[in-house]
Amino acid sequence: MRLETIAVHAGAEVDASTGAIAPPIHLSTTFEHGPASESIHGYSYIREKNPTQSRLEDAMAQLEAGEAALVFASGMGAGATVLQSLAPGSHVIFPDDMYVDFRNLSRDFLPKWGIESSNVDMGSAEAVGNALRPNTKLVWVETPSNPLMKIADIAAIAQIAHAAGAQVLVDNTFATPVLQRPLTLGADMVLHSTTKYCGGHSDVQGGCLVLRQREPLYPGLSQTRRVLGAVASPFGSWLVLRGLRSLPCRMERHSANAMLVAQELSKSSKADAVYYPGLANHPGHEIAARQMSAFGGMLSFLVRGGYDDAVRVASRVKLFTNATSLGGTESLLEHRASSEGAGSKTPANLLRVSVGLEHPDDLVEDLLQALG
Ligand SMILES: *Cc1c(COP(=O)(O)O)cnc(C)c1O
């Protein structure tokens, strides 16, 4: 089946007991079992799994072409569960540009867990190969990356990592399975912050892992999630599931709008650089065109000048709202270095944009008037 059809139908089975078309939200924390705790209905306790969550996992696994999925309370919960499943003494390779709290996690928590890490510019797959160590267990890819929109070649990195016995995780939050399916390119795991495009309406927090093969990772990850507790709630699962139904339509419009905004920004003398993989002058454009079906709704740009100039532009937008996060129907903009806080490596004149579903001309007009 094609992706648009999967998005509408996966996990959408008619409720057997009522015929309801919209899926029920099962809030029960506990489920009947036998006198010696024998499973009767397949569920026992909410932190282990619940029926609304199972529908979402089924849908995410199908969308990403994986054998199994696990959903979490947040994207961070999903990522932390992977890292907490590694044995002490392991080494992880991260990108040099990535979601800020994963950078904070690798700096502040991994050393306490006895896990080594390094950061590499993944624009070159060879650089990943050079960073491999005998104890490298995981290569963590984020493409496009947050906030510099760097592109990594998933297939090339997977080949190099697998030859060295390391697994590959791709944070696919920006692209979504609509635009990029890392498991079909050789990655072992996909991570989503479903808080973003999958939910799609800025009203739910969640995370997800999808595995190319159920074994050998699923039992360990599922146990880590159950014991450490970062599991998705039934209502959160239901909202993300509802978001998935329109994901292909939304990504098409997000991508078309962002392409126009990127092209128009590129013409402005007030923007020094525009980072959008859909632009032919983006260093990762060729790879992105090969592994993505469109380029998504995220972009960033450098305002000519410095910190003050960028903040001035951010203070002048009228239609865009200054806010963090991304992937909702409304367009957002943020001065990313201030949002990332101490230790941020993001340029002081960079603004990050989540292009929404408004008419693109209104978005372009607002940005151009803000640039002045
Ligand atoms: C937001 C985000 C995360 C973290 O997800 P939460 O749901 O906020 O915990 C991870 N990766 C990327 C690329 C993100 O944008």
Image (tube, rainbow, N blue to C red):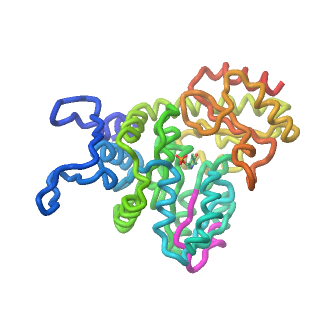
Question: Horizontally, is 151 left or right of 38 in the view?
Answer: right
User: Residue lying furthest bottom in this view?
Assistant: 134
Q: Is residue 164 above or below residue 240?
A: below
The residue lying at 68 percent from left, 59 percent from top is 96
User: Residue 43 in the image: x percent, y percent?
Assistant: 23, 52
Question: Horizontally, is 141 left or right of 24 in the view?
Answer: right
**Quadrant of the image for the C terminus?**
top right
Residue 352 sits in quarter: top right
Magenta range? 128-141
User: Which one is in front, 33 or 222?
Assistant: 33
Q: Is residue 274 above or below residue 210?
A: above
Q: Is residue 137 magenta?
A: yes
User: Which one is in front, 108 or 168?
Assistant: 108
Q: Is residue 113 magenta?
A: no
User: Which one is in front, 289 or 115?
Assistant: 115
Q: Is residue 177 above or below residue 12?
A: below
Question: Horizontally, is 25 left or right of 109 in the view?
Answer: left
User: Residue 165 in the image: x percent, y percent?
Assistant: 49, 74
